[in-house]
Protein backbone atom coordinates (compact mmCIF):
# COMPACT_ATOMS: atom_id res chain seq x y z
CA UNK A 1 0.00 0.00 0.00
CA UNK A 2 2.78 2.43 0.91
CA UNK A 3 4.60 1.67 -2.35
CA UNK A 4 1.44 2.46 -4.33
CA UNK A 5 1.05 5.77 -2.49
CA UNK A 6 4.62 6.76 -3.24
CA UNK A 7 4.15 5.89 -6.91
CA UNK A 8 1.12 8.19 -6.95
CA UNK A 9 3.22 10.93 -5.34
CA UNK A 10 5.83 10.53 -8.06
CA UNK A 11 3.30 10.53 -10.88
CA UNK A 12 1.38 13.46 -9.38
CA UNK A 13 4.43 15.69 -9.04
CA UNK A 14 5.65 14.68 -12.51
CA UNK A 15 2.23 15.51 -14.00
CA UNK A 16 1.98 18.96 -12.40
CA UNK A 17 5.57 19.80 -13.34
CA UNK A 18 5.03 18.64 -16.92
CA UNK A 19 1.77 20.59 -17.15
CA UNK A 20 3.40 23.84 -15.99
CA UNK A 21 6.47 23.51 -18.22
CA UNK A 22 4.40 22.46 -21.25
CA UNK A 23 2.09 25.43 -20.70
CA UNK A 24 4.99 27.89 -20.73
CA UNK A 25 6.66 26.26 -23.74
CA UNK A 26 3.41 26.20 -25.74
CA UNK A 27 2.52 29.78 -24.83
CA UNK A 28 5.53 31.80 -23.58
CA UNK A 29 4.62 34.07 -20.70
CA UNK A 30 1.50 32.12 -19.73
CA UNK A 31 2.95 31.30 -16.29
CA UNK A 32 2.88 35.04 -15.48
CA UNK A 33 6.19 34.85 -13.66
CA UNK A 34 6.81 38.57 -14.12
CA UNK A 35 3.68 40.71 -14.23
CA UNK A 36 3.99 44.50 -14.25
CA UNK A 37 1.02 45.95 -12.41
CA UNK A 38 1.41 49.57 -13.54
CA UNK A 39 3.71 51.94 -15.38
CA UNK A 40 5.73 52.70 -12.25
CA UNK A 41 6.39 49.02 -11.54
CA UNK A 42 9.92 48.33 -12.76
CA UNK A 43 10.49 44.96 -11.04
CA UNK A 44 7.33 42.99 -11.70
CA UNK A 45 5.78 40.30 -9.54
CA UNK A 46 5.14 36.55 -9.77
CA UNK A 47 2.11 36.68 -7.46
CA UNK A 48 -0.28 36.14 -10.38
CA UNK A 49 1.47 32.98 -11.52
CA UNK A 50 -0.32 29.59 -11.56
CA UNK A 51 2.63 28.35 -9.47
CA UNK A 52 1.56 30.65 -6.65
CA UNK A 53 -2.04 29.43 -6.92
CA UNK A 54 -0.92 25.79 -6.74
CA UNK A 55 1.23 26.58 -3.69
CA UNK A 56 -1.73 28.08 -1.84
CA UNK A 57 -3.90 25.12 -2.88
CA UNK A 58 -1.31 22.65 -1.57
CA UNK A 59 -1.18 24.49 1.76
CA UNK A 60 -4.98 24.54 1.99
CA UNK A 61 -5.09 20.75 1.49
CA UNK A 62 -2.43 20.34 4.19
CA UNK A 63 -4.50 22.51 6.55
CA UNK A 64 -7.61 20.40 5.95
CA UNK A 65 -5.68 17.19 6.65
CA UNK A 66 -4.32 18.61 9.91
CA UNK A 67 -7.85 19.66 10.86
CA UNK A 68 -9.02 16.09 10.23
CA UNK A 69 -6.23 14.68 12.43
CA UNK A 70 -7.03 17.17 15.20
CA UNK A 71 -10.70 16.16 15.06
CA UNK A 72 -10.29 12.38 14.79
CA UNK A 73 -6.97 11.58 16.50
CA UNK A 74 -7.04 13.26 19.95
CA UNK A 75 -3.58 12.05 20.99
CA UNK A 76 -2.02 13.75 17.94
CA UNK A 77 -4.03 16.98 18.30
CA UNK A 78 -1.12 19.13 19.60
CA UNK A 79 1.07 18.24 16.62
CA UNK A 80 -1.82 18.65 14.16
CA UNK A 81 -2.57 22.09 15.60
CA UNK A 82 1.09 23.06 15.37
CA UNK A 83 1.58 22.08 11.75
CA UNK A 84 -1.87 23.35 10.84
CA UNK A 85 -0.87 26.72 12.30
CA UNK A 86 2.32 26.60 10.25
CA UNK A 87 0.32 25.87 7.09
CA UNK A 88 -1.93 28.86 7.85
CA UNK A 89 1.16 31.02 8.39
CA UNK A 90 2.53 29.91 5.02
CA UNK A 91 -0.77 30.79 3.33
CA UNK A 92 -0.73 34.27 4.87
CA UNK A 93 2.86 34.74 3.71
CA UNK A 94 1.98 33.58 0.19
CA UNK A 95 -0.95 36.02 0.05
CA UNK A 96 1.03 38.97 1.41
CA UNK A 97 0.92 40.85 -1.90
CA UNK A 98 -2.88 40.72 -2.13
CA UNK A 99 -3.44 41.40 1.57
CA UNK A 100 -1.30 44.53 1.29
CA UNK A 101 -2.97 45.55 -1.97
CA UNK A 102 -6.63 45.04 -1.09
CA UNK A 103 -6.75 45.46 2.71
CA UNK A 104 -3.89 47.48 4.17
CA UNK A 105 -0.16 47.85 3.78
CA UNK A 106 1.73 45.34 5.96
CA UNK A 107 -1.59 43.82 7.08
CA UNK A 108 -0.20 40.35 6.43
CA UNK A 109 2.51 40.94 9.04
CA UNK A 110 -0.11 41.80 11.67
CA UNK A 111 -2.19 38.76 10.74
CA UNK A 112 0.86 36.51 10.78
CA UNK A 113 1.90 37.86 14.17
CA UNK A 114 -1.52 37.07 15.64
CA UNK A 115 -1.48 33.50 14.28
CA UNK A 116 2.06 32.84 15.54
CA UNK A 117 1.27 34.32 18.96
CA UNK A 118 -1.77 32.06 19.33
CA UNK A 119 0.27 29.08 18.16
CA UNK A 120 3.06 29.77 20.65
CA UNK A 121 0.53 30.18 23.47
CA UNK A 122 -1.13 26.89 22.52
CA UNK A 123 2.20 25.07 22.40
CA UNK A 124 3.24 26.42 25.78
CA UNK A 125 -0.05 25.43 27.37
CA UNK A 126 0.01 21.91 25.89
CA UNK A 127 3.78 21.34 25.85
CA UNK A 128 3.54 18.09 27.82
CA UNK A 129 0.90 16.63 25.48
CA UNK A 130 3.00 17.75 22.51
CA UNK A 131 6.06 15.94 23.88
CA UNK A 132 4.11 12.73 24.43
CA UNK A 133 2.58 12.90 20.93
CA UNK A 134 5.96 13.61 19.38
CA UNK A 135 7.62 10.63 21.09
CA UNK A 136 4.86 8.36 19.77
CA UNK A 137 5.47 9.69 16.28
CA UNK A 138 9.18 10.28 15.80
CA UNK A 139 10.95 9.04 13.74
CA UNK A 140 8.54 8.73 10.85
CA UNK A 141 8.51 9.19 7.05
CA UNK A 142 5.92 11.96 7.31
CA UNK A 143 7.97 14.08 9.72
CA UNK A 144 11.11 13.49 7.65
CA UNK A 145 9.40 14.76 4.50
CA UNK A 146 7.95 17.74 6.38
CA UNK A 147 11.45 18.57 7.61
CA UNK A 148 12.85 18.25 4.09
CA UNK A 149 10.15 20.53 2.69
CA UNK A 150 10.76 23.09 5.44
CA UNK A 151 14.50 23.00 4.72
CA UNK A 152 13.85 23.85 1.07
CA UNK A 153 11.34 26.60 1.89
CA UNK A 154 13.21 28.27 4.76
CA UNK A 155 16.87 27.66 3.90
CA UNK A 156 17.31 26.82 0.23
CA UNK A 157 14.80 29.16 -1.46
CA UNK A 158 15.83 32.40 0.33
CA UNK A 159 19.50 31.80 -0.50
CA UNK A 160 19.15 30.51 -4.07
CA UNK A 161 16.46 33.10 -4.83
CA UNK A 162 18.66 35.96 -3.58
CA UNK A 163 18.74 38.54 -6.37
CA UNK A 164 22.42 39.57 -6.00
CA UNK A 165 23.37 35.92 -6.61
CA UNK A 166 21.70 35.93 -10.02
CA UNK A 167 23.12 39.34 -10.86
CA UNK A 168 26.58 37.96 -10.09
CA UNK A 169 25.97 34.78 -12.13
CA UNK A 170 24.37 36.36 -15.21
CA UNK A 171 26.07 39.75 -15.16
CA UNK A 172 24.87 41.93 -18.04
CA UNK A 173 22.53 39.11 -19.16
CA UNK A 174 20.57 39.26 -15.91
CA UNK A 175 16.80 39.19 -16.23
CA UNK A 176 14.69 39.17 -13.09
CA UNK A 177 12.21 36.70 -14.58
CA UNK A 178 14.95 34.03 -14.53
CA UNK A 179 15.43 34.51 -10.80
CA UNK A 180 11.67 34.45 -10.20
CA UNK A 181 11.24 31.25 -12.24
CA UNK A 182 13.96 29.37 -10.37
CA UNK A 183 12.70 30.61 -7.01
CA UNK A 184 9.06 29.71 -7.62
CA UNK A 185 9.77 26.23 -9.01
CA UNK A 186 12.08 25.36 -6.11
CA UNK A 187 9.53 26.70 -3.63
CA UNK A 188 6.82 24.59 -5.26
CA UNK A 189 8.99 21.49 -4.83
CA UNK A 190 9.26 22.26 -1.11
CA UNK A 191 5.49 22.55 -0.82
CA UNK A 192 5.03 19.26 -2.68
CA UNK A 193 7.25 17.60 -0.06
CA UNK A 194 5.13 19.25 2.62
CA UNK A 195 1.98 17.81 1.07
CA UNK A 196 3.43 14.29 0.86
CA UNK A 197 4.71 14.55 4.44
CA UNK A 198 1.28 15.70 5.61
CA UNK A 199 -0.46 12.79 3.87
CA UNK A 200 1.99 10.31 5.40
CA UNK A 201 1.58 11.92 8.82
CA UNK A 202 -2.20 11.60 8.51
CA UNK A 203 -1.86 7.87 7.80
CA UNK A 204 0.44 7.42 10.79
CA UNK A 205 -1.75 9.48 13.11
CA UNK A 206 -4.74 7.35 12.14
CA UNK A 207 -2.74 4.17 12.80
CA UNK A 208 -1.61 5.45 16.21
CA UNK A 209 -5.15 6.40 17.12
CA UNK A 210 -6.51 2.98 16.16
CA UNK A 211 -3.93 1.25 18.38
CA UNK A 212 -4.72 3.29 21.48
CA UNK A 213 -7.11 1.84 24.07
CA UNK A 214 -10.61 3.22 23.75
CA UNK A 215 -12.49 4.76 26.61
CA UNK A 216 -15.37 2.88 28.21
CA UNK A 217 -17.84 5.29 26.61
CA UNK A 218 -16.38 4.68 23.15
CA UNK A 219 -16.52 0.91 23.63
CA UNK A 220 -20.08 1.15 24.84
CA UNK A 221 -21.07 3.18 21.78
CA UNK A 222 -19.49 0.51 19.61
CA UNK A 223 -21.54 -2.14 21.36
CA UNK A 224 -18.56 -3.86 22.93
CA UNK A 225 -19.74 -3.47 26.49
CA UNK A 226 -23.24 -3.80 27.93
CA UNK A 227 -24.79 -0.67 29.39
CA UNK A 228 -24.48 -0.40 33.14
CA UNK A 229 -27.81 -0.86 34.96
CA UNK A 230 -26.91 1.35 37.89
CA UNK A 231 -27.62 0.73 41.53
CA UNK A 232 -31.40 0.75 41.23
Image (tube, grey):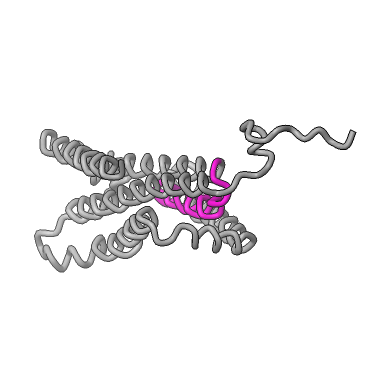
Considering only vertical position in the picture, is 43 above or below 227?
below
Magenta-colored stretch includes residue 3:
no
Residue situated in front as seen by the camera: 218 or 161: 218
Q: Is residue 70 visible?
A: yes
Residue situated in front as seen by the camera: 208 or 219: 219
Q: Residue at x 69, y 39 (%)?
A: 217
Q: Residue at x 81, y 33 (%)?
A: 229
Q: Give the quadrant of the C terminus.
A: top right
The x, y position of residue 111, in whole percent, is: 53, 51
Outermost residue, right side: 232
Decide if residue 178 is on the left or right side of residue 208: left
Considering only vertical position in the picture, is 35 above or below 220?
below
The x, y position of residue 210, in whole percent, is: 51, 44
Q: Residue at x 19, y 42 (%)?
A: 14
Kindly indicate the quadrant of the structure image that contains residue 26: top left
Q: Is residue 49 visible?
A: no
Magenta-colored stretch includes residue 82:
yes
Q: How many marks?
A: 0
Decide if residue 19 is on the left or right side of residue 64: left
Considering only vertical position in the picture, is 183 above or below 24?
below
Kindly indicate the quadrant of the structure image that contains residue 130: bottom right
The x, y position of residue 184, in whole percent, is: 26, 50
Decide if residue 17 is on the left or right side of residue 40: left
Residue situated in front as seen by the camera: 211 or 111: 211
Residue situated in front as seen by the camera: 34 or 186: 186
**Magenta residue span:** 72-97
Q: Give the quadrant of the N terminus.
A: top left
Q: Residue at x 23, y 50 (%)?
A: 185
Considering only vertical position in the picture, is 153 above or below 210?
below
Dominant secondary-structure state across the stretch colored magenta: helix
Amino acid sequence: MALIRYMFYLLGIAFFTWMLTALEIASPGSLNLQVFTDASDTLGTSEYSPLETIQVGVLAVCGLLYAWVASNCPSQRPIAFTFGGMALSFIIRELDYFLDLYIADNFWQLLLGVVLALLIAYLYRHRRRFRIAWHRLWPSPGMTLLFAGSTIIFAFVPLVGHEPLWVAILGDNYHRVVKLAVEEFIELSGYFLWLIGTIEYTYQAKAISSQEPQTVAAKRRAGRLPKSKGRF
